[in-house]
Image (cartoon, rainbow, N blue to C red):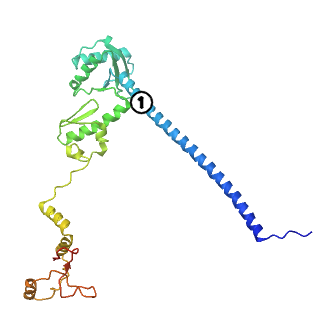
Amino acid sequence: MGEKEITIRDVYLLMQQINSNLSEKIEKVEQSTQSLCKTLKSEVATNKEEVQLLQEENKQLKTQLEKVERRQRHNNLVFYGIEEEATETQYFLIETIVEITRQKLEVELKESEINDIFRLGKKTGHKRPVLISLLSHIKRQEILKNGPKLKNTGIFIAEDLSESDLKERKILIGGLKEARNNNKKASIKGNKLIVDGEVYTAGDISHPDQITSGDYFSPPQRKIASEPPTPSPKEIEEEELNAVFPTLTKRDSKKEEGIPPSTSNQGKPQEEKKKEEQKPKPKTSSISSSGETPKNQPDLVQDQPGSETQTI
């Protein structure tokens, strides 16, 4: 028994079956891919929300930590320029601070009002600052208020600021120096800089290195965008003419630029030009059968049917 002969129809049916199988597989792959994409998108959206929540929580924790740190430093002061003895003790520091506040600041400070006192940093051979923690915030403010009395003594007092507050204070001090160099009345109150009655924050100043102009603290420099200039009457008139007669305005602008208009009067004597201008002009455009305007006729602007023709 001989082999069955394969016809073109058999090949065609086989190809159809293969294509059908491939289509089913491709469809399954596409469905699987779409399902996977949806799952991934959902997971990405969930992760994004979680990251945003964590960022918000982190921001809140930082804010709370800064508040706690400020509260801990609320009654602290730092004295700079106090001589450091090789064998000094904590009690010696207390006596030194009490003596300075009484004699030079004219503030009555008792030893019992001092909560803690110590020098900051490691020994380097220089005068290390002395941090003093008081029990009363009122007493702390009284000492700080009388700080200018230590002028020319080599000793000065500063607030005990956190790292973030120190960065802001440096920016404010840079702004303060710049303002005073430009003969402006400036002072720092808390975390704000006041220049000629206007209040600035560290965010307004950004960074002292960026202050390059003496007019930085002038109110006009702080505007986001300047107002557009008021147009002159001539500019208003030109805009109105351009809206009504755009062709006329365009030709006038060419004259101002030195571009001669395309008229038939060029190269003719002045008297002939005047005679031609005095001749009555037609109300309709004279156009030849070829659609071209005769060379001896002036340019015309033809309006829509039913309206009068304007001759320029």
Numbered disc 1: secondary structure? helix
- Residue 261 screen position, x and y as percent: 19, 79
Image vertical order of residue 167 relative to residue 156, above or below: below
Looking at the image, residue 185 sits to the left or right of residue 211; the answer is left
Quarter of the image where the N terminus is located: bottom right
Image vertical order of residue 126 relative to residue 6, above or below: above
The residue located at (20%, 85%) in the rendering is 286
Residue on which disc 1 sits: 60
Looking at the image, residue 44 sits to the left or right of residue 194; the answer is right
Taking the view exactly as shown, the residue that stands out farthest to the top is: 112
Taking the view exactly as shown, the residue that stands out farthest to the front is: 306
Pick the residue in front: 68 or 292: 292
Which amino acid is tagged 1? Gln
Pick the residue in front: 37 or 177: 37
Tell me, yes or no, if residue 218 can be seen here. Answer: no
Taking the view exactly as shown, the residue that stands out farthest to the right is: 1
Pick the residue in front: 254 or 303: 303
- Residue 309 screen position, x and y as percent: 17, 76
- Residue 186 screen position, x and y as percent: 20, 36
Quadrant hosting residue 248: bottom left
Looking at the image, residue 9 sits to the left or right of residue 211; the answer is right
Q: Residues within 10 Å of mark 1 (few under 14, many from 20)?
A: few
Tell me, yes or no, if residue 18 can be seen here. Answer: yes
Quadrant hosting residue 55: top left
- Residue 220 screen position, x and y as percent: 20, 46
The residue located at (66%, 51%) in the rendering is 28
